Amino acid sequence: MADALTTGRRSELREFLRSRRARVTPAEAGLPDGAGRRRTPGLRREEVAVLAGVGASWYQWLEQGRDISVSPQVLDAVARVLRLSNAERRHLYVLAGLNPPVPEVAPEQRQARCEGLRRLIDTWMPYPAHIMDAYYHCVMYNEAAGAVLGMRPEITQNCLVDFFTDPMYRSRSHSWERNARTVVAQFRAVAGARPDDGGYRALVAELRSKSPEFAAMWEARDIEDAGQIRKELDHPLVGLLVVESTALRVPARPDLTIVLHTPLDEANTAAKLEWLATPEGRRGAMYQVAG
């Protein structure tokens, strides 16, 4: 571990673990308070070691940043005893020189943070925006995404499935064939990072059965990082729209991806999107022919 830890990280590891120990009372850890007063608040090193199932000397060396073997299982045991949040647990991994676990969101925080993201994409109006989970399921979208991208309740609401199977989107997209390989390559990079995840395997199986084009592109095994994609769309009311989609992650909801569409300086796209959001544009959309 010595090679992985700089002097600054050793110092931070020591102070971080001390501060977390001081925060946990014996009662919270399931220990009796004892009759005497403690010289320092919180748990003692020996108590953390016993509760985590490690040796007292080993835990002392961990706090000191010594050259010892550290495993994820042991760090998780220490994190459990010290009642670390997911963010604190990841921080502990980094300070100990290990790759941190995948970020998680506590169940009680999900609803409140989703409300904040709903406000974000609604504020992005009149430009399209939507949010999808790790498996590309659409969690929410704004009104412009419905009007421009054809997102609607009656389709599958999986952005990857819809990209290959929704005839409305396919008929509107002038850039579909150029973008399809990029979309699949970006998805393969995401799925490849979690090869044992049944959710990704199920999604790939569904797409292979529904789309021969996806099956062929999947077998190509191309890999790309997530980023920006230029989209050219032929809208039935306003004609050509040229936008750039950007996939963003936010620390508050690491399980979600926000996709924002920004108008490019072509085909008067910004003005057209603004008109589609007006009462007149909305009325026109009510009578447009699908596809």
Image (cartoon, rainbow, N blue to C red):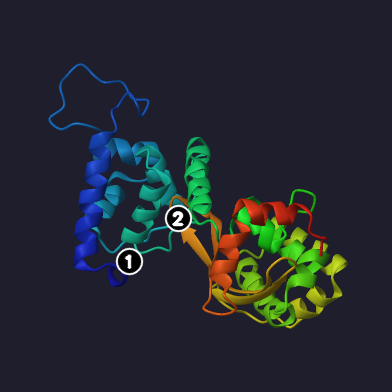
Q: Tell me residue 67's x, y (percent).
A: 28, 64
Image quadrant assignment for residue 129: bottom right
Label 1 is placed on what type of residue?
Answer: Met
Label 2 is placed on what type of residue?
Answer: Pro
Residue 244 seen from this side: no
Q: Earlier in the sequence, mark 2 or mark 1?
A: 1
Describe residue 107's horizontal placement relative to residue 18 as left or right.
right
Disc number for residue 1: 1
- Seen at 69% across and 61% down, the residue is 159
Question: How far, Cα to Cα, is label 2 from label 1?
Answer: 13 Å
Describe residue 192's horizontal placement relative to residue 152 as left or right.
left
Describe residue 202's horizontal placement relative to residue 93 as left or right.
right
Q: Tell me residue 135's x, y (percent).
A: 66, 58
Q: Are marks 2 and 1 in contact (CB under 8 Å)?
A: no
Q: Considering the image in quadrants, where does the N terminus appear?
A: bottom left
Dot 1: within a 10 Å radius of its alpha carbon, few (fewer than 14), some, or many (20 or more) residues? some
